[in-house]
Amino acid sequence: MSRKNLFLLIIASLFGSIGCKPEISESNINAVNQRFDKLVAAKKYLSPKEVESILGQPDRVENATLELETQKKQVPVTRYYYDQDGQTTELHFFDNKLINRVPAFSKTPEPEPQKP
Protein backbone atom coordinates (compact mmCIF):
# COMPACT_ATOMS: atom_id res chain seq x y z
CA MET A 1 0.00 0.00 0.00
CA SER A 2 1.42 3.37 -0.91
CA ARG A 3 1.97 6.09 1.68
CA LYS A 4 -0.72 8.23 0.10
CA ASN A 5 -3.32 5.45 0.39
CA LEU A 6 -2.26 4.67 3.96
CA PHE A 7 -2.54 8.36 4.88
CA LEU A 8 -6.03 8.58 3.34
CA LEU A 9 -7.11 5.43 5.20
CA ILE A 10 -5.92 6.86 8.52
CA ILE A 11 -7.66 10.20 7.89
CA ALA A 12 -10.90 8.45 6.91
CA SER A 13 -10.75 6.31 10.08
CA LEU A 14 -10.25 9.38 12.26
CA PHE A 15 -13.17 11.26 10.71
CA GLY A 16 -15.36 8.18 10.97
CA SER A 17 -14.66 7.77 14.68
CA ILE A 18 -15.25 11.45 15.52
CA GLY A 19 -19.01 11.12 14.99
CA CYS A 20 -19.29 7.97 17.10
CA LYS A 21 -20.70 8.42 20.57
CA PRO A 22 -20.08 5.79 23.23
CA GLU A 23 -23.19 3.89 24.28
CA ILE A 24 -24.47 4.08 27.82
CA SER A 25 -24.62 0.57 29.21
CA GLU A 26 -26.85 -0.72 31.96
CA SER A 27 -23.74 -1.08 34.13
CA ASN A 28 -23.05 2.68 33.71
CA ILE A 29 -26.59 3.49 34.85
CA ASN A 30 -26.27 1.04 37.76
CA ALA A 31 -22.96 2.66 38.77
CA VAL A 32 -24.59 6.10 38.93
CA ASN A 33 -27.58 4.74 40.87
CA GLN A 34 -25.38 2.87 43.37
CA ARG A 35 -23.28 5.99 43.93
CA PHE A 36 -26.49 8.07 44.23
CA ASP A 37 -27.93 5.70 46.87
CA LYS A 38 -24.71 5.69 48.94
CA LEU A 39 -24.38 9.47 48.86
CA VAL A 40 -28.05 10.12 49.67
CA ALA A 41 -27.72 7.83 52.70
CA ALA A 42 -24.81 10.05 53.80
CA LYS A 43 -26.88 13.18 53.01
CA LYS A 44 -24.64 14.05 50.06
CA TYR A 45 -25.39 14.24 46.35
CA LEU A 46 -23.86 13.59 42.93
CA SER A 47 -22.85 16.67 40.96
CA PRO A 48 -23.41 17.05 37.22
CA LYS A 49 -19.66 16.58 36.63
CA GLU A 50 -19.67 13.29 38.57
CA VAL A 51 -22.59 12.03 36.48
CA GLU A 52 -20.85 13.15 33.27
CA SER A 53 -17.71 11.26 34.30
CA ILE A 54 -19.75 8.03 34.30
CA LEU A 55 -22.36 8.59 31.57
CA GLY A 56 -20.52 11.09 29.37
CA GLN A 57 -21.78 14.40 28.06
CA PRO A 58 -25.56 14.67 27.79
CA ASP A 59 -27.13 15.05 24.37
CA ARG A 60 -29.13 18.03 25.57
CA VAL A 61 -29.23 20.25 28.69
CA GLU A 62 -32.19 22.41 29.57
CA ASN A 63 -32.96 24.75 32.46
CA ALA A 64 -36.53 24.65 33.72
CA THR A 65 -38.65 25.02 36.84
CA LEU A 66 -40.10 22.14 38.79
CA GLU A 67 -43.20 22.40 40.97
CA LEU A 68 -42.77 21.10 44.48
CA GLU A 69 -45.43 18.54 45.37
CA THR A 70 -45.67 19.62 49.00
CA GLN A 71 -45.73 23.38 48.46
CA LYS A 72 -47.16 25.77 45.92
CA LYS A 73 -43.68 26.78 44.85
CA GLN A 74 -41.43 26.28 41.84
CA VAL A 75 -37.69 25.71 41.98
CA PRO A 76 -35.12 25.97 39.18
CA VAL A 77 -33.75 22.65 37.92
CA THR A 78 -31.37 21.55 35.21
CA ARG A 79 -32.38 18.58 33.09
CA TYR A 80 -29.88 16.33 31.35
CA TYR A 81 -31.15 14.25 28.45
CA TYR A 82 -29.34 11.18 27.13
CA ASP A 83 -30.56 9.74 23.81
CA GLN A 84 -29.75 6.24 22.64
CA ASP A 85 -31.35 3.89 20.13
CA GLY A 86 -34.40 6.14 19.75
CA GLN A 87 -35.01 6.33 23.51
CA THR A 88 -34.33 9.13 25.99
CA THR A 89 -33.57 9.13 29.69
CA GLU A 90 -33.91 12.32 31.73
CA LEU A 91 -32.00 13.37 34.86
CA HIS A 92 -32.88 16.27 37.18
CA PHE A 93 -30.39 18.43 39.06
CA PHE A 94 -31.35 20.97 41.72
CA ASP A 95 -28.65 23.22 43.13
CA ASN A 96 -26.05 21.18 41.17
CA LYS A 97 -27.18 17.95 42.87
CA LEU A 98 -28.74 14.90 41.21
CA ILE A 99 -32.19 14.58 42.81
CA ASN A 100 -33.41 11.29 41.32
CA ARG A 101 -32.06 7.90 40.32
CA VAL A 102 -31.21 7.46 36.65
CA PRO A 103 -34.01 5.63 34.82
CA ALA A 104 -32.81 2.84 32.54
CA PHE A 105 -33.43 2.92 28.83
CA SER A 106 -36.48 0.73 28.19
CA LYS A 107 -35.86 -2.59 26.49
CA THR A 108 -38.93 -1.96 24.35
CA PRO A 109 -40.61 1.37 23.80
CA GLU A 110 -43.75 1.91 25.86
CA PRO A 111 -46.91 1.86 23.77
CA GLU A 112 -48.59 5.16 23.02
CA PRO A 113 -51.73 5.73 25.13
CA GLN A 114 -54.84 5.10 23.10
CA LYS A 115 -56.99 8.10 22.36
CA PRO A 116 -60.69 7.86 23.25
Image (spheres, rainbow, N blue to C red):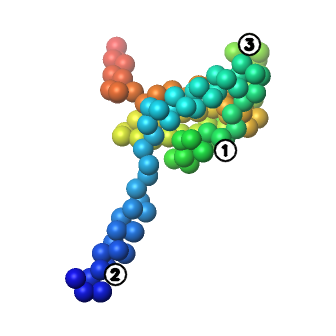
In primary-sequence order, the first of circles 2 and 3 is: 2
Q: Amino acid at mark 3?
A: Thr
Q: Quadrant of residue 4?
A: bottom left
SS label for mark 1: helix
Mark pair 2, 1: CA separation = 37 Å
- How many marks the image carries: the answer is 3
Residue nearer the viewer, 37 or 87: 37
Kindly indicate whether the residue at mark 3 contacts the one at mark 1 (C-beta within 8 angstroms): no
Q: For marks 1 and 3, give the one nearer the viewer.
A: 1
Labelled disc at residue 70: 3
Residue nearer the viewer, 71 or 47: 47
SS label for mark 2: helix
User: According to the image, label 1 marks what residue?
Assistant: 49
In this picture, is 61 found above or below 67?
Answer: below
Quadrant including the C terminus: top left
| Residue 22 appears left or right of 71 | left
Q: Amino acid at mark 1?
A: Lys
User: According to the image, label 2 marks what residue?
Assistant: 7
- Residue drawn at x 22%, y 82% is 1
Residue nearer the viewer, 81 or 27: 27
Q: Quadrant of residue 80?
A: top right
